[in-house]
């Protein structure tokens, strides 16, 4: 929507962009830290975008139908804070506190929707990939609720993001899916952190995006008329995502101490102008700033944005009117819309899910996913070309994949791009209205880690489905066999998010029943990511002494529980997660022949277990009882549970290529070896007493 009365008034728009430049420069100068150069180059685009194109409701930042803006180079946050000050979300005093303890203006803000920050990415490349996820979500919702709910996803990328490998996945996917609702500005200033871009690349970026099926527009990124024209054409594009490659001037407007141009300097990427060798005062004067108050928002710019905001309010109010009319005509759909955004879904009767005996946990997961596909309409599942192996095909069988022009399905075939996929589902969660999950082999969680970390930091309720959880991948060999991965991922159970919660819930279920309960917990978790670590091979269901196995497995929600107990104090506690629990059950049969009293504990999540009361924890794992852990991961995976006096049998090296049953034998993951290790350990333990 173009503001008619300001459209041609270049002076005032120039003044507004200069105001953003000045504020950005002043923030960095005052805090003695930050990135002025890129922010000053991007100011023209950001002003035109926010004042003339981006739809949002100044009075309701969480308006569901707002356009989203995802800033890939989070280091340009000063630019975003500055424009958000013009739109009223930030106060000048907050700008003065840039990057300080407790401020609302941290260096790389991840997420603060109520202040207008949908997302910025510290790790370059993920931001625009998350925007792809948001764009898919918009299409998904429009396919279900109608064109009234269409809106745009704007994203802003810099040289760093374009160079990051993840841009390949984002570019391919957005082009393939024809995401014409995605509009990306490439701040092409030819300068990056330590050098000019020509030192590392001579690619034709426009041709690259053309090859992926994008609409490519090249402009002078500091020419507001060209920016406006490009955005207008991008908005009208119906077939392809758009990249506007804007050639911009790093540090636009900067002067040095002699009053000569200090533009296009690498040094202004990441330090205050004065420290970089420029003159803050001379630059300020050059940009017609107020030398006695560099943080001034000029009256004429205030007046302009007052009109801008009135216009935004009108747009939002008109939409609301249309939406109210729609809701009257579509009561059921409207209810559904609300439930989508609250991430609600119908109750699932897990107990009645028919599961064969002795399934692999990935197969049990497939059955659950099949039921979700039929019943949970706001769920999206994705796989990185492994759906028939990670068993997300359980979901796929009851829906169909997204394709260009058709988003009525609920499955994203991400292609072989695990990091892209993980960032895309983060973007889906950030957009809101959907519950995203993605699957791949556990070993490739390594490829996803940077996006997992951001999901943890932002508290996004995404789900990871990681199958092939251990060396029992078998013949594919060590490249495909996770060893250190469980320990690595569980570190995120130790790490708290800023709300004081474990930043991630990691569940490695021991059999089918635990898998169902693990899914139940994953879906109930709306505040952090959840991971399900699943077996490739079949697992014998754990024994159930009194109840049904499902009832026993409900205790998964405590993180650890007693699977099999003995009369009185146990002589030994056997403890594991995943398929190793069933190996312990078999080992226990041998040990019982020696009249040992045995307790078997399944620990699907140490993080969850440590959240239980002390009394419960001690009831499951009392002190001063010998404890033996079995893990197909590194021994350290169980160290926090077995303690100093415990004994762990785990993997100390990479795996090997061989049939998995051979590996079980060779590596000591058998009932016989459990027996042998426990007997040796108990003998030593007695000696030590
Ligand atoms: C994944 C990742 N690697 C490295 C960095 C460190 N870093 C921050 S900005 C930057 C490159 C800056 O170049 P550009 O994106 O063009 O920004 P400009 O210098 O134009 O502001 C780098 C390497 C990062 N933030 N993320
Ligand atoms: Mg650059």
Image (cartoon, rainbow, N blue to C red):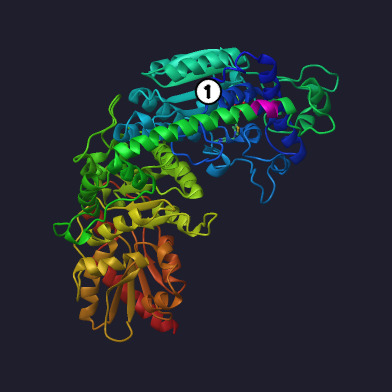
Q: Is residue 267 left or right of residue 429?
A: right
When the figure is inspected, residue 635 is found, relative to residue 385, above or below; the finding is below
Q: Residue at x 22, y 59 (%)?
A: 350
- Image quadrant of residue 283? top right
Q: Main secondary structure of the magenta part?
A: helix
Category of crowding for the residue at label 1, using alpha-carbon neighbours closer than 10 angstroms: few (below 14), some (14–19), many (at least 20): many
Is label 1's Cβ within 8 Å of ligand 2?
no
Magenta stretch in the rendered image? 301-305
Q: Position of residue 486 (x, y in %)?
A: 39, 54
Of residues 508 and 518, the one nearer the viewer is 518
- 303 in magenta: yes
Q: Position of residue 588 (x, y in %)?
A: 24, 73
- Image quadrant of residue 444? top left
Of residues 606 and 57, the one nearer the viewer is 57
Q: Position of residue 154 (x, y in %)?
A: 49, 28
When the figure is inspected, residue 141 is found, relative to residue 591, above or below; the finding is above
Q: Is residue 374 left or right of residue 171?
A: left
For disc 1, the marked residue is 185
Q: Residue at x 69, y 26 (%)?
A: 301
Q: Is residue 301 left or right of residue 630?
A: right
């Amino acid at each position: 929507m173009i503001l008619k009365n300001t459209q041609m008034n270049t002076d005032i728009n120039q003044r507004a962009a200069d105001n953003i430049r000045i504020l950005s420069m002043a923030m960095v100068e005052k805090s003695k830290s930050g990135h002025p150069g890129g922010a000053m180059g991007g100011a023209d685009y950001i002003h035109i975008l926010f004042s003339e194109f981006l739809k949002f409701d100044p009075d309701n930042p969480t308006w569901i139908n707002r356009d989203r803006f995802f800033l890939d180079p989070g280091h340009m946050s000063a630019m975003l804070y500055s424009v958000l000050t013009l739109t009223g979300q930030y106060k000048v005093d907050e700008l003065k506190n840039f990057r300080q303890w407790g401020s609302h203006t941290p260096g790389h803000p991840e997420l603060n929707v109520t202040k207008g920050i949908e997302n910025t990415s510290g790790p370059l490349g993920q931001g625009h990939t998350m925007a792809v996820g948001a764009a898919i979500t918009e299409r998904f919702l429009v396919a279900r609720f109608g064109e009234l709910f269409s809106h745009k996803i704007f994203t802003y990328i810099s040289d760093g993001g374009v160079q990051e490998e993840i841009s390949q996945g984002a570019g391919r996917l957005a082009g393939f899916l024809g995401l014409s609702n995605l509009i990306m500005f490439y701040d092409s200033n030819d300068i990056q952190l330590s050098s000019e871009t020509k030192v590392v690349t001579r690619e034709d970026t426009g041709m690259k995006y053309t090859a992926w099926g994008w609409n490519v527009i090249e402009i002078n990124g500091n020419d507001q008329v060209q920016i406006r024209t490009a955005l207008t054409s991008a908005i009208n594009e119906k077939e392809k995502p758009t990249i506007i490659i804007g050639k911009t001037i790093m540090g636009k407007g900067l002067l040095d101490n002699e009053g000569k141009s200090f533009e296009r300097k690498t040094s202004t990427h990441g330090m205050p102008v004065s420290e970089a060798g420029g003159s803050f005062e001379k630059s300020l004067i050059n940009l017609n700033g107020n030398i006695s108050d560099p943080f001034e928002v000029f009256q004429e710019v205030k007046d302009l944005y007052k009109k801008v905001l009135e216009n935004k309010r009108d747009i939002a109010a008109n939409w609301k009117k249309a939406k109210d009319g729609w809701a009257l005509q579509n009561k059921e759909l409207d209810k559904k819309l609300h439930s989508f955004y609250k991430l609600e879904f119908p109750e699932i009767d897990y107990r009645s899910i028919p599961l064969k005996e002795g399934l692999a946990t990935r197969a049990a997961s497939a059955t659950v996913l099949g039921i979700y596909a039929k019943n949970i309409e706001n769920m999206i599942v994705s796989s990185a070309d492994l759906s028939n192996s990670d068993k997300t095909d359980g979901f796929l069988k009851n829906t169909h994949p997204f394709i260009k022009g058709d988003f009525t399905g609920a499955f994203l075939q991400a292609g072989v791009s695990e990091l892209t996929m993980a960032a895309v589902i983060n973007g889906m969660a950030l957009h809101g209205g959907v519950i995203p999950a993605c699957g791949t082999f556990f070993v490739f969680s390594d490829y996803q880690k940077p996006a997992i970390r951001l999901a943890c930091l932002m508290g996004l309720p995404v789900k990871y489905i990681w199958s092939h959880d251990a060396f029992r991948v078998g013949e594919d060999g060590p490249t495909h066999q996770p060893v250190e991965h469980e320990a690595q991922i569980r570190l995120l159970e130790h790490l708290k998010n800023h709300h004081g919660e474990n930043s991630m819930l990691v569940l490695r279920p021991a059999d089918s029943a635990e898998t169902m309960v693990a899914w139940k917990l994953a879906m109930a978790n709306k505040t952090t990511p959840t991971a399900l670590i699943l077996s490739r091979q079949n697992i014998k269901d754990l024994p159930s002494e009194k109840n049904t196995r499902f009832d026993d497995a409900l205790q998964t929600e405590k993180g650890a529980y007693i699977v099999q107990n003995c009369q009185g104090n146990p002589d030994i506690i056997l403890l594991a997660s995943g398929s190793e629990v069933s190996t312990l059950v078999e080992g226990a049969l041998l040990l019982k022949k020696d009249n040992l009293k045995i307790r078997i504990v399944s620990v699907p999540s140490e993080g969850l277990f440590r959240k239980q009361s002390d009394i419960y924890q001690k009831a499951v794992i009392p002190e001063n009882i010998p404890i033996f852990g079995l893990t197909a991961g590194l021994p350290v995976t169980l160290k926090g549970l077995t303690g100093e006096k415990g004994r762990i049998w785990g993997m100390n090296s990479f795996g090997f290529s061989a049939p998995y049953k051979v590996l079980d034998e060779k590596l000591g993951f058998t009932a016989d070896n459990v027996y042998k290790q426990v007997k040796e350990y108990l003998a030593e333990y007695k000696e030590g007493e």
